[in-house]
Image: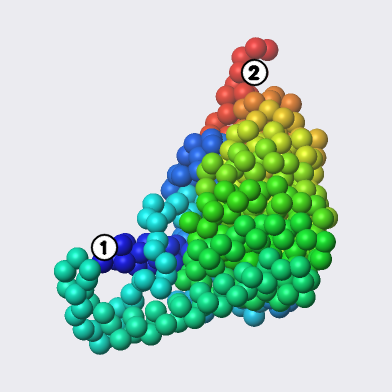
Amino acid sequence: MQMALLARLSLASSEARESSLEERHAGSDEQTSEQSMEEASQASHFDSDSQVLLVSSSVNDSLPNTGQIDREVDIDNGMIRVPSDRTNYSGDASGEVADRGLSVSSAPQRENVILPRLGDVCLEGPFVRRQTSDRGFPRIISSTSIDARGDFSAIENQVRGLINDLGSDSIEGQRSATSEIRLLAKHNMENRIVIANCGAINLLVGLLHSPDAKIQENAVTALLNLSLSDINKIAIVNADAIDPLVHVLETGNPEAKENSAATLFSLSFIEDNRARIGRSGAVKPLVDLLGNGNPRGKKDAVTALFNLSILHENKGRIVQADALRHLVDLMDPAAGMVDKAVAVLANLATIPEGRTAIGQARGIPALVEVVELGSAKAKENAAAALLQLCTNSNRFCSMVLQESAVPPLVALSQSGTPRAREKAQALLSYFRNQRHGNSGRR
């Protein structure tokens, strides 16, 4: 009884969190904000000079549908969204991701409760009857619980049959099985847990090396959908999936690459995974996707890189992979990714090599333009990056002043977000102190 109750509570809270991680690429602008610690991964109000968070502090995200028909999970603005098969989910035609607003800090935490098999979970309904448990305590069984058990049992039987096909030598059988598991994992949290409990994750990870492009695409997309469960995030990493995901990122078709980047983004919500992903060699192919992918691929890459950039040791890797020039290119409003790009750039401005790369990539004029014309959160993050640049380099300070940054900073200091006003005021004060100091030396 207690296990069933714990399972229901865990499942309900997981669904509430994961529905906020919503369906990928459905269509809104992400918000960016700063975190309170340099490697902060858990701050709920993003508040320091060093860290920025891609999204607002809700728990989900929706992005625009780019016309692909069977997209399980969409990630944008630092969010994931699951397909809408529930009334409180909003979905798109692809059924895979949107971005409504999940902050990294509000990302789901790993679950501490081990769920029993889904067939043992009772869902309460309007008609109930008492039944004595094995320990002699009365428990309540609902008519809908009985129906749900039957549904779960049917799904479990279906999944076990599909798993047999995953392990077969038949290419057609593997294609069909990966496609069906992909769709089942797309639908709801119960299915995701049943699929994992039946042992599909290890087989799907193995198929990431399939020479058949469709099998590889289906397998990586199924893993993306499964990763919306916190328990499954841990299971996927424990199945040694990171290196095979990097392989897909390097060799897959465009949709497989996008979904591999999205899966890495999803897994990186667990703090320990950020180091593992960074050390796996994932940064370089993510940067390649950032520079050469289609719009959806670029969005998946920039959100994955953002999560990785929260960890200090990954910042140098991202800079060394030549990400800054691509990020500056994406600060062109025509690219539609200004907020995302400036969020990553603000994190990278906290290290010396990041600041040097920003200067070399002509990022300073782009940042000043964002302070003047960007969204509220983009202005905040651009001001934070400029403050890092100016307080650490007189040369960069002169470059910022040459870009006529003072008028938009004055405006921001009066009308921006509280954090933006703080950054703008600090930067203007620094300019004044520098000017007074120089005049005093003459």
- The residue under the point 78% across, 71% down is 171
Q: Mark 2 and mark 1 in contact (Cβ < 8 Å)?
A: no
Residue 295: x and y in percent read: 76, 63
Residue 334 visible in the displayed image: no
Q: Secondary structure at mark 2?
A: helix
User: As shown in the figure, which amino acid type bears the numbered disc 1?
Assistant: Gln
**Which residue is labeled 2 in the image?**
439
Q: What's the amino acid at mark 2?
A: Ser
- The x and y percentages for residue 407 are 64, 44
In the depicted structure, whether residue 230 falls above or below residue 386 = below
User: Which residue in the protein does label 1 denote?
Assistant: 2
| In the foreground, 182 or 74 | 182
* Quadrant placement of the N terminus: bottom left
Give the residue drawn at x 33%, y 75%.
122
Residue 317 can be seen, yes or no:
yes
Identify the residue shown where x is 36% and y is 71%.
Answer: 121
